[in-house]
Amino acid sequence: MLVVDVTERKRMEPSRRQSQVIASAVLAAAFDAIITIDHRGVVVEWNAAAERLFGYARSEAIGQAMADLIIPPQLRGAHRAGMMNYIANSVGPILGRLVELPALRADGTEVPIDVYIAPIVIEGRRLFTGFARDATERKAAETALKKNEARLRLALDASGAGVWTWDRATGLITADEAYRAMYGFAPDETVDYATWEARLHPDDREPLKQQVEECLHAGSQWLEEFRILHPQLGERWLAGLGRVLRDAQGRVSGMTGINIDVTARKIAEEAASASEAQAQETQRLLIDELNHRVKNTLVTVQAMAEQTLRKARDPAHFVESFRGRLQALSRAHDSLMRRTWTGVDLESLIREQLLVGADQYAPITFSGPDMQLKPREAVHLGLVLHELGTNARKYGALKVPEGKLSVTWHLTGHGARRFLEINWVESGGPTVSPPTGQGFGTLLIKRGLKDSLGGEASISFAPTGVTCDMRLPIPQTDDPRKGRAVP
Amino acid sequence: MVVMQMIFETSLQAVGPRTAGIWERLEPRSDRGRRASSSIRQKILIVDDELWAALDMEWVVQTLGHEVVGPAATAEKAIELAGRVRPNLVLMDIRLANDSDGVAAAIEIRERFDIPSLFVSAHGDPIMRSRAAAANPVGFIEKPFSPESLALAIEAALNPDVSLPS
């Protein structure tokens, strides 16, 4: 038999009156609405918070059926059935726990409430006390959170982001499907710091680990782009964001973050920067080449002036000869400029060098296949043709109206040894007498072909007219009959 | 090109009857050159793929009383001629025909035949000069050159021990 001394307890027990005062004060001050009903559903207690929440004064509510006051009509049947079920069988699915239910206010509006209903028995009477709170804000916050989560998931899915969490104590990395796919981890494979580290590109491994260490130490976050070696896809670029996690004591317990595969962007960026560099390089080369050509042209012009001057009989002769040569050089350049210095068509070059001024109507015939000359060949051949034309106009077939000039060309040889042959035949002009010594013009023709073009020229001063057979090698690399020549 | 022609014609009108004097002007210098280089006629290989520039150099070489070898328009031809004729000096352009390189040719000619080169090039930028320095050249004359400066450089190259009046 157990005997317990209850003297002390009795002494500590407040009086019944005291208890009632305390209970009233608690009810009045409670933040939650507190409603008590009897077994019939009639309101026996209704505190100040209930007045505020539902809009009925205590005096209005007490003695009323609670269902008629605050339960929406469509739920009243279920309410009554639930009460009867509890009274008959002592079971109530919504009792003793927090549930969310809709409720009615005095103004007829509905409000969601979080409610806890406790069954109590006082002096043999079954009563129910409910603690209710307006759930509007909580629900709104929850809905917002859900929306945010959905948005975040959508963003993560759209970006192909993978989410990971690393536990510092166990070293284990918990990650979603996207993350595993990104690194090439099998769905059931255990991933930890070491397996993650092993996937990193050797060149990026140490710097990235250092970043993570610094982040752990500082309790901050890291944001980095790095390469991994995917077992199937090879090198991939990932953007990673990591942030420390802390335990209840505030100690760094691990990290969490996301990874995004940015390989496509990286490739595009690299291609863009490469093409920009390439454009700059091309421009630099073009400027260098232009400088080179301008300077070379000046060198040629100066040498032309010096040498023409030395061979000139008098200033007038110099002016005539030099002007002619300068114009020939200019015409060759003009032809090239029109084709943006990529080359020039042989027939155009011949026409432009021979059909100048009054010679527009000269009886000159041209025939030969279409072919392109490179810039250098065009300039040198242009100057040679100028010397031949000048000679013909001054002494040969083009000096008289009945004279004729035929210029024909064709390609000979094949493979590495191919040549352009040009035949210059004058007829119908004054009777030709061979020059006594080799003139400067003849020297320019022969050496132009030989020294500058690696070919040869033979000139014959037959009495019926000057003929000149020219032959120059055509580089093997490009077929001048097809497409455009390159400089 | 049009501008260039105008410049020439305007200058020429200004010079007028005195033009004849221009082509005599090298004579005193070439006399001095002959004295400096003794009476031995030397062989000078000209490497240039541009006819007019080559003619200009030939004229200076001949005026100095030396023998012209070439001209060669490519590095390959230059090396072949240097080996066969063994000139005393090479006047070497840098950008040659068939995309061949005068610096490489000068290095090979010096190494194989111990013949020095005097670069005569329009490309006098520092990069090109430092590249050319690898050939240990006896000098670098920038184009367009004045006949006098080329003549002096040739004589200095042929007579390294004789100091010329500057």
Image (tube, coloured by chain):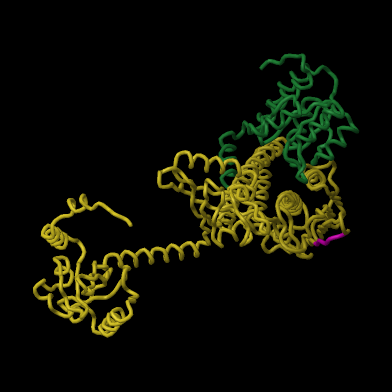
Task: Identify whether B49 is placed above or below A107.
Answer: above
The quarter of the displayed image where residue A347 is located? bottom right
Residue A365 in view: no
Residue A319, percent across and down?
Answer: 64, 42
Quarter of the figure with the N terminus of chain A: bottom left
As drawn, A197 above or below B162: below
Tell me residue A367's x, y (percent): 78, 65
Kindly give the residue lying farthest to the right in the view shown: B84
Judge left or right: residue A428 versus residue A12.
right
On screen, residue A76 versus residue A278, left or right, reads: left
Any idea which chain is the yellow one in this picture? A
Q: Main secondary structure of the magenta part?
A: strand
Q: Nearer the viewer, residue A7 or B25?
A: A7
Eyeballing the image, is A211 above or below A337?
above
**Which residues make up the magenta segment?**
A408-412
**Chain for colour green:** B
Q: Position of residue A176 (x, y in %)?
A: 54, 60
x 14%, y 59%: residue: A19
Residue A411 lies in the magenta stretch: yes
Left-right relation of A311 to A458: left
